[in-house]
Image (cartoon, rainbow, N blue to C red):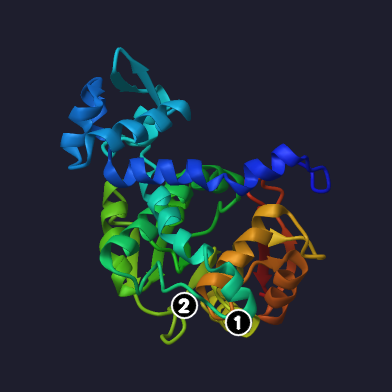
């Protein structure tokens, strides 16, 4: 929908759109989808499996059927093909982790007016400092998202002739994995907090890349970053920081590179007027709610920070990504 082209039905649909989101979140939280992988069940059977009230469960299942995730016939509920592929826990394409991450964000979003008045965060951490369930949803949710895009990104960036990649703040290592799969001569190091290690090592092992991808448990704010790399990859870490901290992180990334190495930044990128695209503008509010200084940055701001950190020939790569995401590349002088 184009901005300035609203109708009253559009406005009301947007205002109440969280109803549908909450129904989906509840279905994933209660895991009503996984038992249906074995076949259709009645509402009472589903309710018994998830320890819920039968009447309320029937109402939730009816809503999920109305949304197109389930099919109801003769009083029983069955999965659609899409739900079977993405909402059943055992499915390879399961996206429940990122859905639960969105669920954990909702309480903070309800306090957005407070954040705007105060200028500070109103939500506790949903990543590394959070309780185990919330942290798992965040880290594996990032894996869910990155798994959709990393193969495309890895195919779109020419790393031929490059031998060592630093995935700075790489979480479960999804991008390092796909860069290595795309480039057989490449090895990688995922640099992230110790709380991430168990998720990263399981993910790396799932792809059989333990011999080519190492995990370095450390804090890129406080700890030294190893050097000797010819590629540094910084995916969606700068938006959690203020401009001064972004510059410090970028300088650490540049220092980790050999002369002639390249540094790549992936972010949700605002236009230079900062009034679009919609997703980066809304994501900036998400950072307001949850961080002290984080926000989405404009392309010009990112390019200027990369240049100030010691890179030259900074440019945006022609890679089409969803939600206003983009990749900037800069090179360390030889």
> Helix, strand or loop at disc 1?
helix
Above/below status of 52 relative to 329: above
In the image, 324 versus 73, the foreground residue is 73
Residue 198, horizontal then vertical, whole percent:
25, 63
Q: CA distance from mark 2 to mark 1?
A: 40 Å
Q: Going by the image, does 204 lie left or right of 179? A: left
Q: Quadrant of residue 47?
A: top left
Percent coordinates x, y for residue 260 in the rendering: 63, 70
> x, y (%) of residue 312?
73, 72
Relative to 317, residue 239 above or below: below
Q: How many marks?
A: 2
250 or 8: which is nearer to us?
Answer: 8
Q: Which residue is mark 1?
A: 118
Residue pictured at 60% horizontal, 61% vertical: 283
x, y percent for residue 320:
67, 44
Q: Which mark is residue 148?
A: none
State whether residue 20 is above or below residue 112: above
Quadrant placement of the N terminus: top right
Query: Which residue is at a point 36% across and 78% down the rendered structure image?
Result: 218
* Residue that lies at the very extreme toward the front in this rendered image: 55
Quadrant in the rendering for residue 265: bottom right
* Circle 2 SS class: loop
Can see residue 267?
no
Residue to which mark 2 is pinned? 227
Between 53 and 209, the one lying in front of the other is 53
Query: How busy is the neighbourhood of tag 2: few (under 14 within 10 Å), some, or many (20 plus)?
Result: some
Q: Residue at x 41, y 85 (%)?
A: 223
């Amino acid at each position: 929908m184009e901005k300035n082209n609203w109708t009253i039905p559009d406005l009301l649909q947007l205002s109440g759109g969280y109803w549908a989101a909450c129904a989906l979140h509840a279905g994933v939280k209660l895991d009503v989808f996984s038992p249906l992988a074995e076949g259709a069940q009645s509402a009472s059977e589903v309710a018994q499996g998830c320890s819920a009230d039968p009447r309320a469960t029937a109402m939730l299942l009816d809503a999920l059927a109305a949304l197109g995730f389930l099919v109801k016939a003769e009083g029983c509920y069955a999965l659609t093909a899409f739900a079977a592929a993405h909402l059943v826990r055992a499915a390879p394409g399961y996206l429940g982790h990122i859905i639960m991450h969105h669920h954990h964000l909702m309480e903070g979003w309800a306090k957005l007016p407070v954040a705007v008045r105060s200028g500070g965060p109103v939500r506790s951490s949903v990543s590394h400092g959070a309780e185990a369930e919330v942290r798992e949803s965040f880290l594996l949710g990032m894996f869910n998202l990155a798994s959709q895009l990393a193969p495309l990104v890895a195919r779109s960036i020419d790393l031929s002739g490059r031998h060592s990649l630093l995935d700075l703040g790489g979480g479960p290592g999804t991008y390092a994995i796909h860069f290595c799969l795309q480039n057989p001569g490449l090895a990688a190091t995922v640099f992230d907090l110790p709380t991430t290690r168990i998720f990263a090592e399981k993910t790396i092992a799932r792809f059989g890349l333990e011999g080519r991808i190492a995990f370095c448990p450390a804090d890129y704010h406080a700890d030294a970053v190893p050097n000797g790399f010819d590629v540094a990859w910084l995916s969606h870490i700068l938006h959690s920081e203020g401009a001064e901290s972004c510059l410090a992180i970028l300088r650490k990334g540049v220092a980790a590179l050999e002369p002639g190495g390249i540094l790549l930044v992936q972010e949700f990128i605002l236009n230079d007027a900062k009034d679009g695209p919609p997703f980066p503008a809304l994501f900036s509010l998400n950072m307001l709610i949850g961080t002290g200084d984080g926000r989405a940055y404009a392309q010009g701001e990112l390019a200027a920070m990369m240049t100030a950190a010691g890179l030259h020939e900074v440019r945006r790569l022609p890679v089409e990504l969803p939600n206003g995401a983009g990749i900037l590349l800069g090179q360390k002088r030889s």
